[in-house]
Image (cartoon, grey):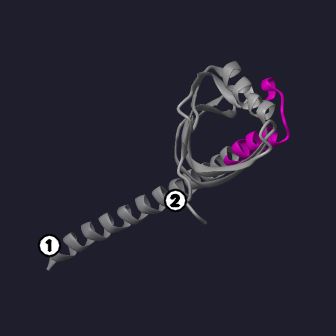
Amino acid sequence: MTACWQNAGYLHGMKTSFLLSLLFWGLHLNTTCAQEGLEADLIKDRLNALVHDFNALAAPGVMAAYFTGDAELLDPNGHTDQGREAIGAWFASFHLVARQHLDLKIDEVLEIRGDCAYVRARYTQQMTWYVEGTDTESKGVLITLLRKEQGAWLVLRQVWVKTGEMYKD
């Protein structure tokens, strides 16, 4: 009978230890999730600000400030720009040929690891071409890799993919 009680005491001790570990892990997980939630909100705010500035006809320097110095962007037509200044000029050039409006719906911040994050979003771009006077619409998916630099989330890589009607709300 003594051995049973000793085993029960050992198991009780293990159970208590396990429950305490689980409790502390849960507290850590809740803190981590809260931090990731805050970071995800900051990332979403940053991308929404980029779209707002694009729609407000922001200057190339304003658009460039959303990107890292070594950023790369692949547009829906397969054109690639590299570097902050080139990407800022690319965004600003859109308004030279057409009146533009970009809508962005962020599906989710897929992952945040340290100073890097992945985001998947859908976009709709409406354009009225100045020369032709015609209206067009482009829809697609946007995949963005961001890196946190000096406390700010900046776009490191961005891939725009036309999908047409594939991702309807």
Who's the residue at 73% across and 23% down the image? 89
**Relative height, residue 2 to residue 100 (above, below):** below
User: Which element is circle 2 on?
Assistant: loop
C-alpha span from label 1 to label 2: 67 Å
Residue at numbered disc 1: 3
Please state the extent of the stretch shown in magenta in the rendering: 44-62
Is residue 102 visible to the viewer in this orientation of the structure?
no
Tell me the chief SS of the magenta region: helix
User: Which element is circle 1 on?
Assistant: helix
Q: Amino acid at mark 2?
A: Met
Q: Is residue 153 magenta?
A: no
Q: Is residue 56 magenta?
A: yes
Sequence-earlier tag: 1 or 2:
1
Residue 109 pos. (x, y %): 57, 50
Q: Amino acid at mark 1?
A: Ala
Who's the residue at 56% across and 54% down the image? 164
Residue at numbered disc 2: 166
Give residue 1's quadrant in the image: bottom left
Q: Nearer the viewer, residue 117 or 24?
A: 117
Give residue 46's quadrant in the image: top right
